[in-house]
Image (spheres, helix red, strand yellow):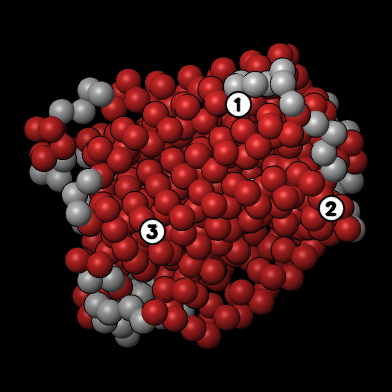
Amino acid sequence: MKTENNMEKRIPGWLVLFLAAACGLIVANLYYAQPLVGPISSSTGISSDIAGFIVTMTQLGYAAGLLLLVPLSDLLENRKLVVTILAVALLGLLGAGTAANSAIFFAAAVLIGLGSAAAQILVPLAAHMAPPEQRGSIVGNVMSGLLLGIMLARPASSLITDLINWRAVFIISAVIITLLVLLLRLFLPKRVPVANEKYTEILKSLFVLFKSKPVLRRRAFYQAALFGSFSLFWTVVPLWLSKNYGLSQREIAVFGFVGVAGAIAAPIAGRLADRGLSRKLTGAAFLIAAFAFAFTHVLEDGNHMVSLVIFCISAVLLDMSVSGNLVLGQQEVYALGDEIRGRVNGIFMAVFFLGGALGSALGGWAYAQGSWKLASIIGLVLPVIGFIYYLTESKKRNREKNIK
């Protein structure tokens, strides 16, 4: 039986590509519904005030999976665990694609989120296999695949809805996940962790880790602030583009493709993190995200085409800040120790996805109350709060983060 201690500390290029693609396909399930809030609400009877919960429920399910399922990667053989968790996502996708009312859809959305947590077992697995000096770049490459999945999910679901209907999005994804499960069983290396704790002890240790690791708390809250603004933006903007600019689902898909350019920040951030530039880049990420929201109000009463271009630029800037800072955060929390990597990754991802769930819910409410103006103000405030917290981080504390 292969254990964590004797795993080959090299990872071939094709496997990095495969892990990146797998993560992207899995995490895409969390975002298919984001530009489809309108069509799903109409079909399932969800009111406009709670339409944001279409995305929020998936993110809450994902956060639960990160806290309850991802820590199992420090206890159970990883390949089998990933395949089992993906079966939950498959059940949720089939439920969403056939949902007749809001209750069924919301329940299915939670299952989709819960099962999609499997991606966050694959990312630490790549870190386990990578040599320490290449960990940042390899994690960055895998995360670029995951982030491409996030960003391509929105335009893909818009196109499929335009060509067929919104239900087809979830049914097609169910087929893709089924094929992915088969490929993972064939090609994913086994990893049996050296487990000295029981599951209940691992769950109890989550709070201890969160309390005792300052860098984990900071990085989780940093990303929660950024991801909250990101989720708000992509929950509300499709509704605003449709109402204010008269864009169709196909045209909204094109807008979504523009945002994909932001994924280039992930591998770049990984390489720069290996050079010790994480702290400076973190501050820049907050400022760029806040600017992205403010920029949408430049010439908002002028030419619609110019205003739409400005929205496109803002989308790219926001996606760059979020994707780049995510890799910076993972690089730091993964350095806390091989034996706790699954748990710290679960905590890190859960906290920032709770921020995303809050952002989606606030976005839906704000848009119903005050359209894009109110929603964008909240979107700008979130990274500003994160930046203020970031300013309290001293260089001394940054040097001592791995000691505590």
For marks 3 and 2, the one nearer the N-term is 2
Q: Which residue is mark 3?
A: 267
Q: What kind of residue is marked 1? A: Thr
Q: Secondary structure at mark 3?
A: helix
The percent coordinates of residue 189 (x first, y second) are: 41, 80
Q: Secondary structure at mark 2?
A: helix
Quarter assignment of residue 231: top right
Mark 1, residues whose alpha carbon is within 10 Å: few (<14), some, or many (≥20)? many
Q: CA distance from mark 3 to mark 2?
A: 31 Å
Mark 2, residues whose alpha carbon is within 10 Å: few (<14), some, or many (≥20)? many
Q: Does residue 110 show up?
A: no
Marks 3 and 2 close (CB-CB < 8 Å): no
x 13%, y 33%: residue: 395
x 55%, y 26%: residue: 295
Quarter assignment of residue 379: top right
Q: What kind of residue is marked 2? A: Thr
x 42%, y 51%: residue: 265
Q: CA distance from mark 1 to mark 2?
A: 27 Å
Horizontal relation, residue 118 to residue 104: left or right: left
What quarter of the picture does the C terminus occupy?
Answer: top left
Q: Secondary structure at mark 1?
A: loop
Compared with 103, 28 (above or below) is: below
The percent coordinates of residue 10 (x first, y second) are: 27, 79
Image depth: mark 1 or mark 2 in front: 1
Q: Which residue is mark 1?
A: 296
For marks 1 and 2, the one nearer the N-term is 2
Q: Which residue is mark 2?
A: 161
Horizontal relation, residue 94 to residue 100: left or right: left
